[in-house]
Amino acid sequence: MNSFSLVEELNAVTESLRRSTVKIRGRRNGIGSGVIWNSDGIIITNAHVISHPKISVELSDGRILAATAIAKNRQRDLAALKVDASNLNAAKIGNGDRLRVGELVVAVGNPNGSTGAVTVGIIHNLTSINVNRPNWIQTDVQLAPGNSGGPLANVQGEVIGINTMIVQGKGFAIPTHVVQRFLERGNERPYLGVSLREVIVPLQGKPSYGLLITDVESGSPADIGQLMMGDVLVGVRGIAFLSPNELFHILENSYEGDGLPLNVLRGDKLVQLDVVLWNKDSSARAA
């Protein structure tokens, strides 16, 4: 493909993306972006974009519509909005777990109040908690306030992620398979059925993060998996926790029926116990 045809293709892709990208006013003094997920009025954005109870959505044709939040999960930083409209320009949704480092990507949003601004970059990294399923897409796309909630797409114009935040100059997007799971499950997530307290334990000769089990719910996945009060969870799949919140992130990105191989400090012995997860409504600090 020559450079001229690549430019033409990117122009067509960005025009299509602009039509399926909306401007959202859901904060007192802020503007964010969103993606028309289907033609019947479902729009996906970030949860932090809609902190104000009154939400309005501006379409690419200039129409301004009132929107209602029908699902919101702050831990995933995702929200689903509904507007009373049909035959909208829905985005083409790609497969967010079939990505490659170095792949060319396009972002559309409303940075600093601009409408339909386009930036191009590449995928720098795919961070994953669950094997083979990335939970974050890291890019060098230049993002700014107002891009949050907007689409990250491949050069075929398929949305592969939702732009969410900037860390040390890198953009981070939530892959579409995580969004689809959010839409399917709402606020349900797999759980263990334990109460936990953060502790520091000696592991391989150095202090490490651990989660002390202070209670086990009878009949829960943890109970059936033979976890006990007094056990200390220190990692998953042989990898030590890097932070005390890591287990909660793993649960947020797990499916019902997943097997979770937990590294457990029981007394002075390190053992592995396999726990099969199932769903329960989210709670603040119970796992």
Image (tube, rainbow, N blue to C red):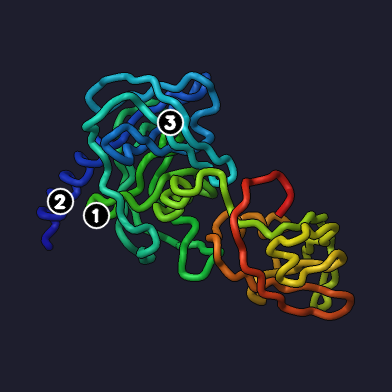
Among the two numbered marks 3 and 1 on one chain, the one whose residue lies closer to the N terminus: 3
Q: Amino acid at mark 1?
A: Val
In the image, 1: left or right of 79?
Answer: left
For the residue pair 130 and 147, the one nearer the viewer reads as 130
Q: Amino acid at mark 2?
A: Glu
Among the two numbered marks 3 and 2 on one chain, the one whose residue lies closer to the N terminus: 2
In the image, 15: left or right of 186?
Answer: left
Disc 3, SS: strand
Q: Assess whether mark 1 and mark 3 are in contact (beta carbons under 8 angstroms).
A: no
Q: Please provide percent x and percent y for residue 120.
A: 31, 49
Q: Please provide percent x and percent y for residue 74.
A: 58, 40
For the residue pair 283 and 44, the one nearer the viewer reads as 283
Within-10-Å neighbours for mark 1: few <14, some 14–19, many 20+: some
Q: Which residue in the structure is indicated by mark 3?
A: 32
Q: Quadrant of residue 22?
A: top left
Mark linked to residue 155: 1
Disc 2, SS: helix
In the image, 279: left or right of 121?
Answer: right
Q: Estimate the spatial distance between the alpha carbons at disc 3 and disc 2, rounded to whole Å.
A: 27 Å
In the image, residue 44 above or below residue 227: above
Residue at the image position 22 percent from the left and 54 percent from the top: 156
Q: Assess whether mark 1 and mark 2 are in contact (beta carbons under 8 angstroms).
A: yes
Q: Estimate the spatial distance between the alpha carbons at disc 3 and disc 1, rounded to whole Å.
A: 23 Å
